Amino acid sequence: MQVSILREPLVLALVVFVGIVALGYVFGQFTKRVLTAIGVGTAVEGTAFERTAQGLGSSTVSVVSRLSSWFIYGVGLLFALYVAGVLDVSVLFAELTWLLPRAFIALFVIIVGIIAGDKVEVLFNERLRGVKFPEVGLIGTVAKYSVIYVAVLIALGQLGIATNALLVLLAVYVFGLVFLGGIAGRDLLASGVAGLYLFLNEPYGIGDRVQIGDRAGVVQEIELFVTRIEDDGTEYIVPNRTVFEEGASKRLP
Amino acid sequence: MDTVSELLSDIVENADAVALFSPTGSLYERFVDADIDLDVIVVGTENGVDADAFVEIPLEFTDITDLVEFGIGAAVGDGYIEEGDVVICATSVFDEEIDTVSRVRAAESVHSDLYDLFVNSRAEPEVIRSVLEVAIDLGKKGQKGKPVGALFVVGDAGNVMNKSRPLSYNPFEKSHVHVGDPIVNVMLKEFSRLDGAFVISDSGKIVSAYRYLEPDAKGIDIPKGLGARHMAGGAITRDTNATSIVLSESDGLVRAFKGGNLILEIDPEEY
């Protein structure tokens, strides 16, 4: 008798649905634990997304874990409908199995993108706080929206929406950044690489009497980009690339 | 009937500025929003309230007189107040919260030696602070319980190196450690076993240990009873633009020399 009840499609569907809902709930709790354990809660602190979530009486961790639960609930509902035979799912099912995971991933990528963007902005602003120059905040904002833009692109790509025009825009943006950055920072880059060599090999050290280019004196400080040499009360700040372009001489003790 | 606040109002009346020592954010905002004709200056180890007029103090003072003197001296040096101004200082003595109010006239004498040591040295203030902390820490604990002496020469490292000789191999050769790095305190403690000076650059890089200083010590006047370490530490600051911070093995005090003169003497136990 019992067996025959279980064979009723409606009952079976209910069992399946309840089972999957329980699974989804457990998975959500598990995600929450994992996210808390790896310190996501503290990492996203101070970002706009977390503040918004907190304003709605929630937090980033619980939003993400609830999202993963709902994804499983959705799958469970579909599967239950399929078992119950309410839905003629053979057509719909193919569509949904394609769309559902992608929609989930897209949503997830957007959330991660927004949080990462916020975090990047906070990081930039913290590093640049010492610079007393109001417009410097623009760098953080630009960095934030760049990250979000890339996240949106990935999300749209997941959903199969044509993003070619946006990709071209991104390519132009990145090219401009690299190209202009390369031109503007060429000297700095050359000095930085030369500075690395000076750090690793220390051909001269603090206290040595050297001549770099046409500047001679006692080395006071070796930094990544410049070497400070002092002679008779004057400190010369020599870019490290000069060492490679013109060579340096050191007086032996 | 006078109330207590009326009776004590003399302390806060006719002042030119008010200095809040490490205030909470809400207290600072109340002062800024209040309609008072006074400059509000915040003094503390860090600017937690984003105040415009902020005076940084480099050490955690326990003696409140030292703290106020340093804060006022630094505020004069930074140009927030002028000499002769009357400043109301709100400090905390017993708890974290502000519980004490004092009235100070900013005079030249208040412009403390300690302020001079930090601000007018060649090395960065942060570096001097770290070295002072290492010396104080070393003075408190010693090495394996025994009192230990040490000599740090900070700043103008190029010239100091040219006026000294190595006593032994240099353990900091080709290393890039800076004072304030977490591992450094242990290293300095170990290397203070052998006599000789630590040489530290303007930016805090430890250039060398075990240096024998060879300055011209003629005419250097240090208090009687101090030994060769202090003499060398004092003399090198006259020959170069460096600052010396010396921990005495015999009396455990930390002393700082600049321009050949003893400018600071502190007892590690007080900090």
Image (cartoon, coloured by chain):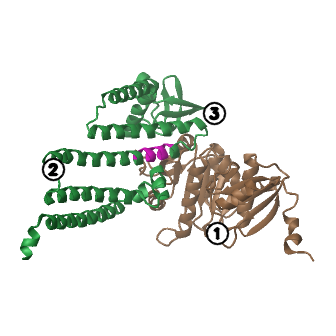
Chain colours: A green, B brown
Seen in the picture, residue A181 relative to B201 is either above or below; the reply is: above
Tag 3 residue: A233
**Residue B73 image offset from top left, x and y in percent:** 75, 53
Seen in the picture, residue B137 relative to A82 is either above or below; the reply is: below
Tag 1 residue: B96
**Residue A223 image offset from top left, x and y in percent:** 48, 38
Measured in 3D between alpha carbons, the distance from the residue under mark 1 to the one under mark 3, in whole angstroms, is 46 Å
Categorize mark 2 by other alpha carbons within 10 Å: few (<14), some (14-19), many (20+): some
Start and end of the magenta stretch? A116-124
Tag 2 residue: A89
A149 horizontally vs B4: left or right: left
Q: Which residue is found at the position 43% from the left and 52% from the top?
A: B168
Residue A17 visible from this viewpoint? yes
Magenta highlight: main SS:
helix
Chain of the residue that carries numbered disc 1 in the rendered image: B
Secondary structure of the residue carrying numbered label 3: loop
Whether callout 1 and callout 2 share a subunit is answered no
